[in-house]
Amino acid sequence: MEDEQSFSDICGGRLALQRRYYSSSCREFCLSCPRLSLRSLTAVTCTVWLAAYGLFTLCENSMILSAAIFITLLGLLGYLHFVKIDQETLLIIDSLGIQMTSSYASGKECTTFIEMGKVKDVVINEAVYMQKVIYYLCILLKDPVEPDGISQVVPVFQTFTACDISEKVCLLLSSCFLSHLGAVWPELLPL
C-alpha cells in the first residue's frame, strides 16, 4: 500500500512524503525535495561572474575572471555533493531496526542503520533557527553505561520539515518501538 502527501519545508519549498507499507512489520517513508532550480543556479552564477567582471575592470587582472569561474564550479560541485539532498528514506523494520538513507543531488548516498535494541525513544525536538522555531524528529539512543541515560540524539530527516510530517512519522516510530518492547498502543497502529 502506498500513499503520497505534499507538505512544505521551513523555507516554504514543496516536499512530497510517500508512505509505503510492505508488510505489517515493514514500512518506509520517502521524503522527496525539489530539484535544483535552473533559475537560482543562473542567478548565482551571473552574480558571481558580474562581480568578478567589475573587479576585472578596476584591476585589469585576468586572474580574477579565472578565479571566479573556478570558485563558481567548485562551489556548485560542493553544494551538489554535500548540501543539496534530493531524497531521504526512512525504512522501519519492527524487529530489526531503522535505516535512514539520504540521496544527494550529485548521486552520493549516506545510509545509517540503528538497531531497534539501541533505541530509547523517538521525540520531536525543537530548535531556534534564525527567527523561527523549527521542529524535527529525533531518535534517542540508549547509553550502554547508564541505563537511564541517552548516548546520542540522531535527527531522522536532514531536511527540516513542517511539524505535521514529524508528528506522523513520530507516531509510527513510537508504535514500532512500543511493539518491539511488547507493549501495545492501539490508537497509533492504524496510522
Image (cartoon, rainbow, N blue to C red):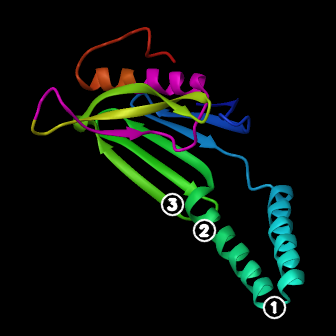
Q: Amino acid at mark 3?
A: Glu
Q: Nearer the viewer, residue 161 or 168?
A: 161
Q: Residue furthest left?
A: 145
Horizontal relation, residue 102 to residue 119: left or right: right
Does the stretch in magenta take in 162? Answer: yes
| Circle 2 crowding by C-alpha within 10 Å: few under 14, some 14–19, many from 20 | few
Task: Name the residue tied to disc 3.
Answer: 109
Determine the image quadrant of residue 12: top right
177 horizontally vs 40: left or right: left
- Mark carried by residue 119: none
Give the residues in magenta: 146-173
Q: Amino acid at mark 1?
A: Ser
Q: Quick one: quadrant of the N terminus?
A: top right
Q: Nearer the viewer, mark 2 or mark 1?
A: 1
Question: Which residue lies under the disc numbered 2?
Answer: 78
81 shown above or below 159: below
Picture residue at 83% right of the left edge, 85% below the top: 59
Above or below 72: residue 87: above
Chain-order first, disc 1 or disc 3: 1
Instruction: Return the residue at label 1.
Output: 62
Q: CA distance from mark 1 to mark 3?
A: 38 Å
Tags 1 and 3 in contact by the CB under 8 Å rule? no
- The amino acid beneath tag 2 is Gly
Count neighbours of disc 1 (C-alpha within 10 A) and say few if under 14, some if 14 to 19, many if 20 or more: few
Query: Left or right: 150 with respect to 84?
Result: left
Q: Is residue 51 magenta?
A: no
Is 89 in front, or is 159?
159
**Of circles 3 and 2, which is in front?**
2
